[in-house]
Amino acid sequence: MDRRTFLSLVGGGVLGGAAGRVSAQPQQRAPDEIDPGPLEGQVALPNSGLQRIVWSVDTDTPAMALTFDDGPDPQLTPSTLDLLDKHGFKATFFAMGYNATRHASLLREIVAAGHELGSHGWRHLSLTKTTAEKTYEEIDRGKKAVEDAAQIPVKLFRPPYGRFDEAAVRFLAGRRDLMVIWSQTRGELTWTDPARIVDHVVNTSRPGDIVMLHDGMGRATFKPDTERSRRVRGRRLVEQQALPEILGRIEQKGLKPVTVSRLMAKATPDDLEA
């Protein structure tokens, strides 16, 4: 389920209370989606607590969060880290569990550079097109893989494609993990001109925004020689070409990229000098 659908269901803002009491499923499913079936008895309702689903932060501080999905990837992550280091910016990387296991040393480089880690599932499955049991497995296995590879706890989760259903919300509520979506992206996937992506990201970003970019291939990781994977790789390379100017112009605009957790803490201007 995307952000617009979720807003239409719960009336906007952040979801509070016992998440198991709110159905985040649209009333009509697309024909290609698999009905996960009844959820009662498949996952325990959390007894207390607050489940928050965050896509931006209400703040006047000139800060935003840059996030990178689908990595780590040996061809994309190192250059992303180099550019962030050049500008002194910190970001949040939502790592795919499968890639975290394969490239554990690269994941640890992300942590050593002072960036934040979140999990992005085990193998980038759409959580609206699978059973509840498979949703739990994807979230749990992905998180454990990232934590084992990085040797740190991880409390942030981003669903692949930004889509989720009631099963995902209930499961995360039970373990007190935070679901993070986004408020800005690179723009249209069909854009092949880096300058167009730069203009879109810079011109639309405001204080408190969470911007979603990529340092990995998502589902295309598993079939690298297909035409679809080549298209995905091409899109990722265009983002990489755009990233240096995105960072430079964001800085000129007076915005400071920070981690999601720091943005949620509503970093003060003094903090941004650190």
Image (cartoon, grey):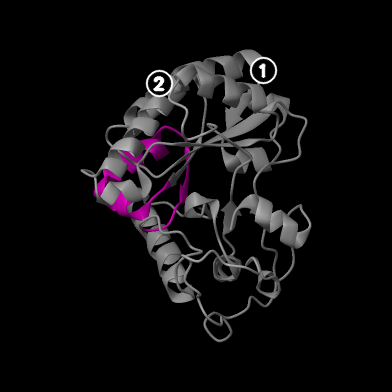
* Residue placed furthest toward the bottom: 41
Residue 28 place in picture, x, y as percent: 62, 68
As helix, strand or loop, the secondary structure at mark 2 comes to helix
In percent of the image, x 41 and y 39: which residue is there? 111
Give the magenta-colored segment's residue range. Answer: 95-122
Residue with the mark numbered 1 = 254
- Viewer-proximal residue, 127 or 180? 127
- Relative to residue 127, is residue 79 drawn left or right? left
Q: Amino acid at mark 2?
A: Gln
Relative placement, left or right, of 48 versus 219 is right
Label count reads: 2
Residue type pointed to by label 1 = Gly
| Residue 274 appears in the rendering | no
- Regarding mark 1 in the picture, which secondary structure is present there? loop
Q: Is residue 77 above or below residue 71?
A: above
In the rendered view, would you say 98 is above or below 136? above
Identify which residue is drawn at 61% across, 67% down. Answer: 173
* Of residues 227 and 136, the one drawn nearer to the viewer in this rendering: 227
Image coordinates of residue 13 in percent, x first then y, are 76, 52
- 190 drawn magenta: no
* Labelled disc at residue 241: 2
Q: Dot 2: within a 10 Å radius of its alpha carbon, few (fewer than 14), some, or many (20 or more) residues?
A: some
Q: CA distance from mark 1 to mark 2?
A: 22 Å
The answer to whether residue 118 is magenta is: yes
For the N terminus, which image quadrant?
bottom right
